[in-house]
Image (cartoon, coloured by chain):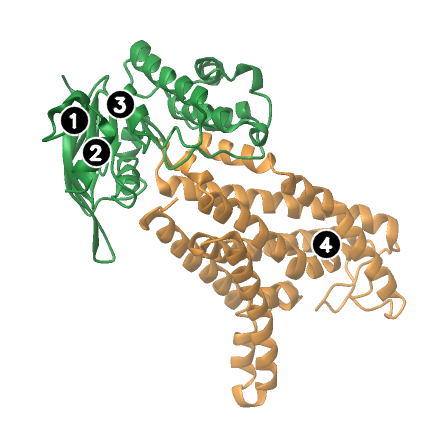
Chain colours: A orange, B green
Amino acid sequence: MRSLITSEWERLWARKLTWCLFLSMPVVNYAAGRYFLSANAHTASDLPQYAVFGNYPVLGFEEMLMTAFNIIVIMLTSLVVTEEYRTGQLRMVMLRAYSFGQIFLAKAAVIGSIISMLVAVYFICSYAVGYFLFPHTDTVKLFFYEEAVGHGMALAYNLKFYGLGLLTLLAMIAVTLWIAVVSQTTTTAMGLGIGFYIFSLLYPLISEYLVHWLGFQLFSRIYFSSIPMIQWQGLVLMLGESPRYGGYIFTVIAAYTALFAGLAYRSFTRMDRWV
Amino acid sequence: MSSVLEVNDVTKQIKGRTIIDGISFSIPKGEVCGFLGPNGSGKTTMIRMLTGLLAPTKGRIAINGIDMKKNRTEAALKMGAIVESPIFFPYMTGRGNLRNLARLHPNLSIQEQRERIEEVLGIVGLTARADDRVGTYSLGMKQRLGVAQAILGNPDFVILDEPANGLDPMGMRDLRNLILSLREKYNMSFLISSHLLDEIQKVCSQLILIKDGRKVWSGRTVELGGGKLGGNEKGNLEDAFVELMTR
């Protein structure tokens, strides 16, 4: 199994895309920094959305988590699974002495590892960009906290946010893995992945119009059943001074991961391989 | 003589349609066997089942006595294959492709992997171009790299699906000599599917012919091409093949 993962890992790093993704992290982070720098001009400095060195890592990641990182997951999974599978490249691996289940698990592990590394690089870049672009204050305002907190606590909060953000990306990987396995072409896989992403953005927004009819409790359940909405608003609610929706959001993330990873595994291992 | 491949009453049905219908045959060790049939006869489906990419609806396939259904991973250790056409990771060099696949052979240490890669590059005559990207290779070089991939794990049995497709006469001769030398030196057995009957006649000692998913003939090549088939006295494999397929 270790050899299989090493082989997958080597192939992924032989692609220009992987290097481009890592090299883009500082650029994407700097772009987010410039955005928050201009937003600061119109934001009161005592609000948590006012970017300072201590809270920029979360502010910058929150925006990119629900946009750039989800798109990266869709792209990476489509290329690593659908492209290799449907062009027949994966046949070379399938003909070797490994079960199809092992091949699937190696692919999932490598995609998960690369995304984890990208998140870690983004975290480090956030502190670097935040250090140079934003004011250094003694205390940091966080979302859903009454009082500003010290830098140690802000760092712990940031780490928790990145950890939870990574969990949502793993759920997204599970969904896109299933899409990638059942899609006939890379274009279809990317199209369906983007379609799922847009659908996940749209139905919570539509449900906002029905909140009077649905009731607030049902509305919030529907709203936080969407991965991008969890990334955008759910995580800060979970990490607030009085955490909210924590159990529900964990259940949703676990359900997405288990259901779609299970479906993807089943499809990959059971169906005939016309590759 | 013991068999390297045994196929017993194998059937494949897809969406209610029978693609392969109760085929049985075996290949003795050290034999080069041709697998012939017109387009759509089920050759590639059969080859996919032999390599474990497809599961038979019924029947048993064994490589060196190891049941493909019960223990595919162990059976795969004994086998190398090119299915349909050799395919590579285009963003890697020839050596990079082999190195990546050599990692998947659990019985080879890293040093042994390196030695084996150099050995197979030498066998297929690609050492000088091993560090070039696969995209710059000619068709003949790609076929040879495909063979190198197939024999990387030092298999007992190699399946080559249309290995001479698109090759010029020199490329075909090189490939033929390569197959025959691998059989001579390493006692490797081959199953070769091809429409190039002249090549098959030159290299294969045994033939299996299928049509509409059924085996229509199997035996020594000389028996089919050598004028034993009713009415065909010329010993020409093409004539004998056409006669069998149009019956």
Q: Quadrant of the image for the N terminus of chain B? A: top left
> Do the residues under discs 2 and 1 have CB atoms within 8 angstroms?
yes
- Label 1 amino acid? Leu
Q: Chain of mark 3?
A: B
User: Which of labels 1 and 4 is toward the front?
Assistant: 1
Whole-Å distance between the Cαs marked 3 and 2? 11 Å
- Residue occupied by mark 2: B241
User: Which of the two discs, 3 and 1, labels the residue nearer the N terminus?
Assistant: 3
- Residue occupied by mark 3: B201
Q: Is residue A207 above or below residue B34?
A: below
Q: Residue at x 48, y 49 (%)?
A: A82
Circle on res. B224: 1
Whole-Å distance between the Cαs marked 4 and 2? 81 Å
Residue B66 can be seen, yes or no = no
In-image side of B136 versus A107 (left or right): right
Q: Quadrant of the image for the C terminus of chain B? A: top left
